[in-house]
Image: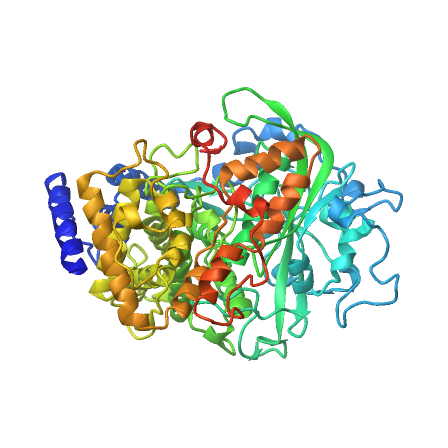
Amino acid sequence: MGWERVTRHIKSSRTRQRRSSHHTPPPLHTQTSTVALLVLLSQHCQATAPAMYPGSHLKVSSHKLARRGARSLFHRFRHHHRDHRRHHHPQHIPGYTRLRSSPPVQKKAFWVASSTASSTSSSSSSSSSSSSSSDGFRPEGLKGSFAELDVVNRFRSELRADPEHTNTRRQVEAAYSDVAPTPVSSPAVLLHSVDMLRELGLDPLYAQEAEFAEVVGGNRLIEGSAPWAACYGGHQFGNWAGQLGDGRAISLAEVEVPAALASDDDDGDVGEAREGAVGRVDVDDGEGKAYTAGRSKTWEIQLKGAGETPFSRRADGRAVLRSSIREFLCSELMHALGVPTTRALSLVSTGEQVIRDVFYDGRVRGEPGAVVCRVAPSFVRFGSYQLPFSRRDASLVKDFVEFTIRHHFPEFREGHSYDYRGWFEEVVRRSAELVAHWQAVGFAHGVLNTDNMSPLGITVDYGPFGFLEKYDRRYTPNLSDRTLRYAYGNQPYIVKWNLYALSMAINSLVSPGEPAAELGDDTQKVLESYDGLFQRAYFRHFDQKLGFVPDWAETTLQVPETKRILIEELLRLLELSKVDFTLFFRRLAFLEPNERYTLSSLPGALAEVLFDNLADGEFDDDLTEGWEAWFESYLEAVRDSEGDDIVHWRERLLRKNPRIVLRNYAAQRAISDAENGDFQTLERLYEQLQSPFAVTAEEKSLINKGASSQANVRGDGCSQDSDILEFERPAPEWATKTRGIAQLS
């Protein structure tokens, strides 16, 4: 039978793996000094990666990496305050004098937007400048401008403010600093998200008005708002980096949108809920201030590339069109895929040049500037708690935790009482769910530092990200990640590492009364739940990618052995065969469960993907036997699960597996054309990324074979289109070897 053949191949593979292994996994101690904790964690996670984190068999020097990170974290935390003046007074910051000598931006330019500012033009898709209500009609409840939104600014009013108001680089011992965007010469809207406009309660036609471009370009403030830049720290590549903060991001405002206007599209799996809700229950803070959780959504509106802040260090606070296009497209794609993420409201060109060293090799060049308006329930990060902890500012750590619970996890608060452990358990669960979802869509974040992780369990900061082409656990889109720390297959382990780093900052709240030098029992028990949570989420997603309904995931953390074998063997074969990750799963729908296949008899659409990277068009005998055994076992499982009703199996395959993701070469095509003033490729690509599950005419015909209604197939009504095929295809050979496409700076 197929299962016996699969098991035989797995056993032989594991035997070869054991023979090549050079170490024995050490035990993960439950009580140890905090200095050694991350070292042991890293050794344990890497050594046991094949069992704990599927697809994480990386040849990385984890011991060296973790020792460096642990020493950096604790030694710097421990000695940070031996000389408070040296560390916290600006004159002692290296490079401060030179940075300060640059003239600060004038307040007038920050706060006053001229009514005779440049005439703003929109993209070809939004070129009209007429008022959205000029015809007397606007959808009920939607607002006609930012000025009509309900600005609440809770982050500013409830957390400690920086007492200094100059826009100069300095150490800030507060949650944020006042700073406003630096105006640009000619803001023009290139792209905007109609869906996100509606989420904010705004009429989509508002994006055609000049005022919209002025606000999202940084030339005009939202009425009633007071912009700020957040202060936080973080670990970068395992090393404690100290103060980081929003170096080129400025938050304009927090706005509250009535639930009647906010869409409720939480129809996905566990962990796929949109993270915009304030909460699920009504909460009274004990002082007469009610938080209407569950009745509204709160959104923080932020501009990336809007100018210098006190945290810009040696940078100019600006962003280039190249990176801004990538962030806009990917954040909206991830939302369409059902992955929790920050959103993109708009992409604006500034009409100005920005000087950049693209590959950090000394060759600078001017690039078109841009601003992305991104939106999230909150941009608080792991580093928001870490930085005050490193400064022994326990009150600010507590303020941040309670602020987060109050507005985003109100179920863990009752009056003045906060359930810190329950909140941390939820942070761990959401983090495990998030990285499992990344793995399922083939997404590699590229720079998974602690300052780039959110306690809300949403994807933040799209830098050198990438999606898998061929399945490769060692894939990293980051040109500077030479140790593969942030490679695709290593992401589950890194998320756990980051959770441990976060736990040190909040340990005194989660495990009160425990020695400060060690993680408390409660904290460790919460962290130890991560492995089971991740594995359940990971195998649930891949079970769904194979078209099954994972009922087992609702009742247990234990993954059925048959599921584990089927999925792990498939991933092994995909990697050995260098098969395109996205298209393989999509084209499983072309199989007929009642057929028995050899590799030569596979449906053409699937065979095309399977054999795409073979020079001679044939597998060796071992791979051939492995693939045929896997297909036999898989289709046997489909028959056992579905019986004669295979239509719903196909529908589930098409709903779960996208046919298009943001491939780097496609993004680069759009970027190159846009830099030359041609935005048609960009607009076509964005249009297709908004419907990643769109079905082709050929796929519809497969469903129609069973005389089933297509109503449940996401993207119904879309037909096969040459533009979709253009961006759906795997990267051409030249693109896989080109710096800036295969890997990014």
- In the rendered image, is residue 21 in sight? yes
Q: In the rendering, at what x and y percent does residue 616 appear? A: 30, 32
Q: Is residue 537 left or right of residue 310?
A: left
Residue 576 lies in what quarter of the image? top left
Where is 195 relative to 246, above or below? below
Q: In the rendering, at what x and y percent does residue 578 appear? A: 32, 40
Q: How is the image coloured?
A: rainbow
Q: How many marks?
A: 0
Q: Quarter holding the N terminus?
A: bottom left
Where is 72 relative to 711, above or below? above
Depth order, front residue of 652/507:
652
- In the rendered image, is residue 26 in sight? no
Q: In the rendering, at what x and y percent does residue 114 appear? A: 86, 44
Where is 622 relative to 3, above or below? above
Q: Is residue 103 left or right of residue 293?
A: right
Depth order, front residue of 530/659:
659
Q: Is residue 350 left or right of residue 659?
A: right
